[in-house]
Every structure is written in C-alpha cells, then in structure tokens.
Amino acid sequence: MRAYLLARLGWAVPIVIAILIINFLIIHLVPGDPIQALVGDFPTPPGYAEQIRKEYGLDQPLLTQLWLYLVNLAGGNLGFSFANRQPVLPLILDRARFTLLLMLPALTCAAVLGVVLALAAAPRAGSLYDSSVTAISLIGFSVPIFWLGQILIIAFAIKLRWLPAQGMISLRETLTGWAAVADVLWHLVLPGFSVTIYYIAVVARVARASVLDALSQDFVLTAKAKGLSGRYVLWRHVLPNALIPVATVIGYNFGYSLTGAILVETVFAWPGIGNLFIASIGNRDYPVLQGIFLLTAVAVVLANVVTDMLYAVLDPRVRGSYGKNA
C-alpha cells in the first residue's frame, strides 16, 4: 500500500510542475497589458507605467519571468496581486474558504443522494420510478447551472421573497454568534441547491449504470441462491463492486470544487475563488490567476491520488495487480 501511494505521489509532482509552466506561458501570451488594466484610462505621470512594470518584473523576458516565478514559488511566495495590492497566497486562501463552504456541503449531499437514488432505481430498471429518476437526472445534467441559478433567484428571491438573492451575509444589519451562522446558511440555500442538483444528476447516472452492471454478475445470482435478502445483496455485495466508477466521478467533482463554482458564484455574487477568478481576468492580474491555477492543479491531483487510494481500499485486486507489475 505504501509503494502504491508513493508511486501515485511520484507521478503527481511532475504533473503539477508541467501544469504550472503551461499555465504561466498561456497567461502571459494572452493579448492584453496588465499595467494598462491596472492604470486604466486616467492620465498618469511620464514614466509611471514603466516604473510599475519594472516593480512587478514585467519588463523582463518571458523565460526570466518564468524562472523567477518558479524560484519564488519554491520559497512559498506566490507573488503580489496587481489589482488587490496584497500577497496572492492569503488572498486566495481567504476566498477559498468561502468556495469550500459552498461546494463541499453541496458535493457531499450530491454524492450521498446520487448513490441512494441509483440504488433505489437500478433494481427496478424499466419501472416508472426508474424512468422518473433517469429523466430527472438527465434534466439536471442538461440544464445550465447559471440558468438554473437565475430561475431560482426569480422564483424564490424576487417573486416569493423567501430567500436572499445574492451575497453571503446581510448588509443591512450586523449579526454575531449563531445569528451570523444562520444568516450565512440562509444565503447558502440557493447557490448550494444549484450546485447540488447538477452533481446529483452526474453521480446518479454513473451510479445507476454501475449498479446495473453489478446486478448482472454471477456473484449476485449466487448470493440470492444462498437465500440472502435482496436488500442485503444490494448493500453488501452490489454496492462495493459498483463503487469504483462512482468514486471516480465523486473524486473528479471534489477535485474541481475550488473553481467549479465560477458560474454559481458569479450569479449569486458569492465572494469565493470563482468570483476572484473572473475579476482577475478582467484586471490581467497574472499572479492571482497563476495562484488560482496552482491551487486548482494541486486540488485536482490530490483528489486523483485520494481516488486511487480508494480504488485500492474498495478493490484489493488493484493493490495486487500493482504489486505484480512492480
């Protein structure tokens, strides 16, 4: 198991480095001048733009900038934000906690409910219930998440006035303690529901197909022939054998949770990584964009490593095959 983990981590390091270099080059080759975006159209003193460009190292050749970026990154320095006038690392970490507050509960609920719906629908394949779950999951997967968010705002915030439309806290009053927690959760309902609906559909579709495949295997027929109940066979034998494709989808979703809420955060004005990402594109804020790409790359790679570890836990044959190949 340790060799399996070390092998996966060994592949993760060069992948992250390659992603960093490619993202750096793509960002800097995109048309647009970050100094012009920072200064704007206002008249500036002579030489001011060149002074700012030199201060941020943008007057250096591209490969020199890349080398300096990698050296600073090795020392834990992600750079300084042009537009926000503060170090990149604390800025991103501050926004990341709001994105995780939105995404992690939604993805957890989607994973659990998606698997439960699949387990309830797959044994009844072809029934009205199964067709309903399939249709709902198809609709949830097909509806654009930003469009769904706007419909929810119109229905529940504007028409019914049940829930707040945007933001994370109420601006008209200052709340503390449990009242502040309840206020944040109240603002979390609509964006969280938008994310949950989409990912439930994704998980349910994959889980249903995987459970159907497991139900057709010989071990299920053998278990039923021994007199085991259908529910016991489903939870004890079918589910463990159907979880590997489901774990792949869940791990993929969690890996992209930091930036997967870009559209939702934009629609609901949620102050997370996605909102910062959109603003940084408009401001040509290279250090922040590079920091977000770095955080996303690390999150995706770590999610894949954890998913690989789950493979080894769910199916001992994975560990055995790795040992033979090694």
Image (tube, grey):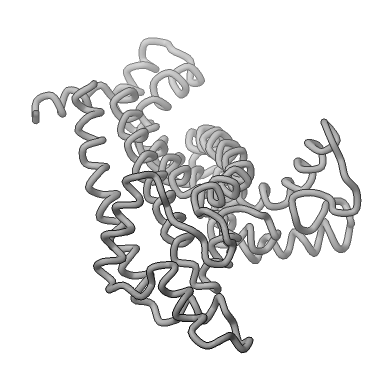
Q: Quadrant of the N terminus?
A: top left
Q: Based on the displayed image, in which of its 4 quarters is residue 308 positioned? A: top left
Viewer-nearest residue: 307 or 18: 18
Is residue 102 something that shows in the picture?
yes
* Location of residue 286 in the rendering, given as x and y in whole percent from the top left corner: 44, 66
* Location of residue 235 in the rendering, given as x and y in whole percent from the top left corner: 47, 22
Q: Based on the displayed image, in which of its 4 quarters is residue 30 positioned? A: bottom left
Viewer-nearest residue: 95 or 168: 95
| Relative side of 29 to 6, left or right | right
In this view, 53 is above or below 228: below
| Relative side of 36 to 5, left or right | right
In this view, 255 is above or below 292: above
Q: Which residue is found at the position 48% from the left and 16% from the top?
A: 232
Viewer-nearest residue: 308 or 92: 92
* Location of residue 284 in the rendering, given as x and y in whole percent from the top left corner: 49, 72
In this view, 225 is above or below 275: above
Q: Which residue is found at the position 21% from the left and 27% from the top?
A: 4
**How many numbered dots are placed on residues in this image?**
0
In this view, 41 is above or below 295: below
* Location of residue 314 in the rendering, given as x and y in whole percent from the top left corner: 34, 24
Viewer-nearest residue: 22 or 193: 22
